[in-house]
């Protein structure tokens, strides 16, 4: 049997229309809310947000509709003044010695005893005046006799310097390698840094200039003339070249900045013939190394060596007595020229005459040929 729906009455039709309208409104609201949520969820997270970092945290934010104030023109950035790069100080030599404001006397000799024979009383007077004295001996003065004789002469020199400074005492030794590579043994009396004595210990060249068999007949003359390329110290230290030796003397001059320098008469001078060949070479090396230094050159004095015996005696009295006594103290360690007292020292062949003279020469007085 077929079922037929009954016809709607007026009240039921109105209820149905209201329900449909409510459902439609709800649907519209649902769609609108869903759209809002979708916009919030789908907005790109990277959207920039402007933040005024210069504003005070308590200042009111400007209304979005307000026109933004014009940004002030940026202040000019000052161009920084370049800082000058400081010029580094020159490297300090391991041989550097200060003198607390007192003048420094640099003396450079061939053999231990050349200083006290030819340059006194200049050296002893400098010590007495409170100056610093820096003495350097380039050869060992070994005479082919070995290190025992070398060390005896070196001890004699230290005792002579004790006599000149008027004080006995121990000396301490420093083994120093210059920037040039030259090795020196430098000694100073304990508690008296004004004085130093340095030994390079190159071979003695002999009065004949032929050297000694014990040191392979090597000499300073052969080094300076180029017949040998290098020269090794008698104590087994590293050999050095002529250029190294000149550079070493220059480094020593820079290290102590002497107000005066004493050394031997160089080759080519009218006062060189008849002198020990080692003396002439050392004078030549010192002149080559230091005479171009405008601060040092005026103070260089070259002392006449063996040929001084042909010049008039110019020392006597108390000055000569002090010089001879200093020399006598030295000779107690040098078995070759030992003398017991003043009279015997002055009677020693040649040495007695040299002791009674001291002739320094300026550059202008060298009479270079």
Image: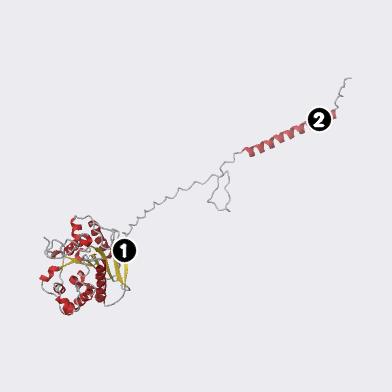
Per the rendering, the mark at residue 269 is none
The residue carrying mark 2 is 16
Image quadrant holding the N terminus, namely: top right
* Closer to us: 136 or 199: 199
Q: Residue at x 13, y 70 (%)?
A: 308
The residue carrying mark 1 is 176
Q: Is residue 103 visible?
A: no
The local secondary structure at tag 2 comes to helix
Image quadrant holding the C terminus, namely: bottom left
Relative side of 162 to 6, left or right: left
Of all residues, the one furthest to the right in this rendering is: 1
Question: Residue 243's x, y, as percent?
Answer: 23, 56
* Closer to us: 285 or 174: 174
* Closer to us: 165 or 41: 165
Q: Quadrant of residue 332?
A: bottom left
* Closer to us: 316 or 144: 144
Question: Residue 274's x, y, as percent?
Answer: 12, 65
- Look at the numbered discs 2 and 1 and tell me whether their residues touch, using CB distance below 8 Å: no
The local secondary structure at tag 1 comes to strand
């Amino acid at each position: 049997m077929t079922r037929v729906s009954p016809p709607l009455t007026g009240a039921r039709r109105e209820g149905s229309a209201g329900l449909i309208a409510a459902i439609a409104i709800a649907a519209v609201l649902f769609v609108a809310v869903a759209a809002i949520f979708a916009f919030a969820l789908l907005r790109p997270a990277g959207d920039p947000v402007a933040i005024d970092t210069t504003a005070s945290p308590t200042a009111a934010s400007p209304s979005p509709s307000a026109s933004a104030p014009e940004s002030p023109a940026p202040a000019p950035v000052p161009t920084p003044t370049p800082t000058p790069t400081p010029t580094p100080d020159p490297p300090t030599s391991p041989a550097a010695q200060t003198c607390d404001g007192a003048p420094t006397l640099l003396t450079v000799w061939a053999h231990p005893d050349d200083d006290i024979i030819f340059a006194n009383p200049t050296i002893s007077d400098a010590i007495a005046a409170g100056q610093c004295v820096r003495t350097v001996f380039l050869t060992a003065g070994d005479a082919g006799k070995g290190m025992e004789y070398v060390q005896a002469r070196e001890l004699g020199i230290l005792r002579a310097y004790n006599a000149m400074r008027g004080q006995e005492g121990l000396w301490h030794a420093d083994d120093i390698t210059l920037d040039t590579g030259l090795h020196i043994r430098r000694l100073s009396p304990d508690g008296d840094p004004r004085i130093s004595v340095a030994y390079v210990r190159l071979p003695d060249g002999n009065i004949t200039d032929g050297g000694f068999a014990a040191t392979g007949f090597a000499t300073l003359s052969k080094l300076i003339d180029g017949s040998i390329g290098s020269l090794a110290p008698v104590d087994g230290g590293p050999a050095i070249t002529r250029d190294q030796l000149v550079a070493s003397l220059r480094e020593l001059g820079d290290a102590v900045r002497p107000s005066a320098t004493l050394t031997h008469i160089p080759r080519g001078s009218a006062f060189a013939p008849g002198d020990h060949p080692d003396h002439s070479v050392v004078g030549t090396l010192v002149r080559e190394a230091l005479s171009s230094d405008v601060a040092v050159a005026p103070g260089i004095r070259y002392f006449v060596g063996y040929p001084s015996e042909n010049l008039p005696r110019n020392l006597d009295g108390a000055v000569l007595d002090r010089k001879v006594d200093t020399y006598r103290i030295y000779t107690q360690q040098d078995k070759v020229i030992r003398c017991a007292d003043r009279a015997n020292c002055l009677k020693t062949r040649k040495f007695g005459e040299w002791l009674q003279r001291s002739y320094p020469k300026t550059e202008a007085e060298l009479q270079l040929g």
